[in-house]
Image: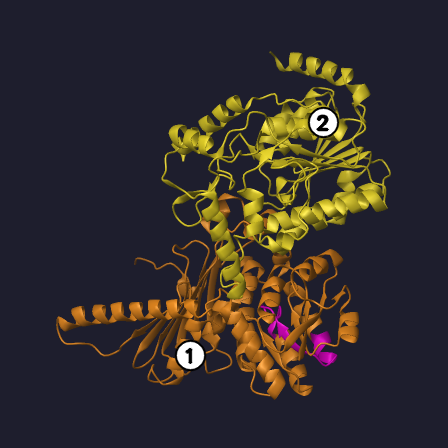
Chain colours: A orange, B yellow
Amino acid sequence: MLKVAIVGCGKIADLHALQIQRIKDCEIVGICDREPLMTKQLSDRFPVKRCFTELPELLDQARPDVVHVTTPAESHFDIARFCLEQGCHVYVEKPFTLYADQAELLINLAERKSLKLTVGHNDQFTHVARRMRALVQSGYLGGTPVHIESYYSYDLGDPSYARALLGDKNHWVRRLPGKLLQNVISHGIARIAEFLTTDSPQVIAHGFVSSLLKQINESEIVDELRVIISEETGTTAYFTFSSQIRPPLHQLRLYGPKNGLIVDQDHEILIKQRGQKFKSYADMFIPPAQFAKQHLGNLLTNVRLFLGRDFHMDSGMKYLIESFYGSVRDGAAVPIPYREILLTARLMDTIFEQLTVNKSQNLRPAALSPLRAD
Amino acid sequence: MSNSTTNIASQENGLLQQDRFIVRPDDRILVTGAAGFIGARVLQNLLNRGLRNLVCFVRPSSELSEIEAIIEHRPPDARIELRKGNLLSREDCEAASKDAAVIYHLAAGTGEKSFPDAFLNSVVATRNLIEASLRFGSLRRFLLVSSFAVYSNCDKPNANILDETCPVEEHPELRGDAYSFAKVRQEQLVTEYGKKAGMPYVLVRPGSVYGGIKSDITGRVGISAFGPFLHLGGSNTIPFTYVDNCAEAIVLAGLVKGVDGEAFNVVDDDLPSSRKFLRLYKKSAKNFRSIYVPHAMSYALCYLWEKYSKWSERQLPPAFTRKRWHSEWKKTRYSNQKLKAKLGWMPKVSTAEGLRRYIEACARDRRYA
């Protein structure tokens, strides 16, 4: 029986507890939060053995094998490091750390102590993401991706989070180096990082405050971001983060030398895009029929998964946790390679650095400067 | 009547009633959630009763136009302090509750689907406020505005009448409703402080508060989560209380002597059935298609949903459960006798008049939407 602990009993801890109790051969031996009432509300609703308000006591008395860190991002590094030092495997919610050097330190520490470490990029383990990965690994793209596009939307109208953030000038998200972006873009960036092959690609970032936020006198929260990433090997990527585009998108588009793939996470749809063209008018009749067939296939897959009780909203999280526990138990590879975690952190660092520099100098990136009509 | 005339009349009214109240006009009174739907009415009611030392605690993000209008038109001798802050901050709680004789605690986490968020903004915030206020030794009453959502609506002592003697939900975690979970735990917390720290408190449980610009239809009538509006209330009585009547009850419960440790349900007289209300709404405010779901069927659907949710390991969240059915859609009658007998409350706005105003506001709202 794997002994699991959760540190931080807020909103995201609920999702962790829910998924952990669905996984066989593990139990929540302890939860910890500085606010004892918050541990109480979690233990009221989930099978939890003991509640703690101090991390050292949790580790000392409950002796967990794995610790899930579900606290606000600014404390991830210190808590994860302490847990690793005390010999626990650690699952850190996203964003992994505030800075890439902290991510590197944690990974080195885990490797030195032969412990496992992962980050909550659970969107990469939904059913549709796993189907996409299997196709890529089977060589469907025809080689390394030539171009990647990742879209990640965020609805600021969500009353439970965004209003609290916008209304509270002391909200913890405002204290993050990348503010709102730091707390939400890692899912979309990690999708790109998975397919990059070098460790330091070039990045051009352009961020701005949407007109909607400007109307309510918000000048700090950047809620629109466009990023261009390019590697020496020739792979390029666009990342789009937006609070304003409709419909809200959570998509990944992969284009290889032979074929392409579109992953629509919102609707759990995977569409294969054949690189080969049909002759003449056939190219206008056969592909639509093929797309219709693919959409029908996606529908049937989703229905089958639902009827099979395997289509939960957070199925990606369960898969990731289960895979991570598997790697802890039998020493298998971690579900998210450390290189990918580190690259995601580095890309985010670079994006936030550029936004800060551009803001302080009131600059737009050179590549995005307005064209002159000479 | 001019403002000044109203104020003099109100002052006299307040002075006349002072022997019934636990406070004097200059005692400091804190209202949390003062910018909310009910809070602004509570503030106006307190002013009308001649209370002259008020502190309004609001979130930094609150819409303040209504409260600012009240402050602008306050009686010349009245002092109203507007404090922006967060009840999750102990410092903010201390600053707000300093020397308060009565605390009207209306602020709550509403509309939140997340259990931790609802709990944090209701229970933890309430704990902070109580602890801060107890430090000053000036507190004569802590009034918590709770909700009908705390009742299990099962095993009622008086047939199908829901009154203050009815049991509170013992396992709110099983209802699948974050709001009722937080409200039950919030009441428990206040009661514990009453027992352990000797804190004088009163609980006020309003039914479905309506009026003003709040134009959504209560879930007790029906829901539209699945597309067409499902009318679940049928012939049930809806426990409406017009916002001004509710504010009046809250204010009295905070002031009247001899009711410490009591709970009061707030519903108006002459309550309409769900069917009658829906007919009126569709006729005068907004017409839409609704499908009536008989009680036996809604119970069966809640039962099946609950079972499926458990069997599928929450592939569907337990949003519809038998506990929720008992709480919201079971045929129930309501009593306001205790409120009238112990607080001398009477609804100043009749249900007929309240509904007329509400429907008119809804129709106007729709026109400008």
- Between marks 2 and 1 in the image, the one whose residue lies nearer the viewer: 2
The x, y position of residue A39, in whole percent, is 71, 60
What residue is at 80 percent from the left and 41 percent from the top? B133
Say which of A138 and A297 sits in front: A297
Pointer 2 indicates a residue of which chain?
B
Q: Which mark is residue B196?
A: none
Task: Work out whether residue A74 can be spotted.
Answer: yes
Q: In the drawing, what numbered circle is on residue A133? A: 1
Q: Provide the secondary structure element on which disc 1 rests.
A: helix
Image quarter hosting the C terminus of chain A: bottom left
Rendered location of residue B44, percent (x, y): 65, 25
| Image vertical order of residue B210 relative to residue B73, above or below | below
Q: Secondary structure at mark 2?
A: helix
- The image position of residue A269, as x and y in percent, is 37, 68
- Specify whether residue A82 is painted magenta: yes
Looking at the rendered structure, the kind of residue marked 2 is: Leu
> Nearest the camera: A218 or B352?
B352
Kind of residue indicated by mark 1: Arg
Give the side of residue A154 with respect to residue B176, left or right.
Answer: left
What residue would you read off at disc 2? Answer: B252
The quarter of the displayed image where residue B266 is located: top right
Residue B166 belongs to the span the image colors magenta:
no
How far across and how far down the image is residue B273, in percent? Answer: 49, 32
The image quadrant of residue A147 is: bottom left
Which segment is the magenta one? Answer: A81-100
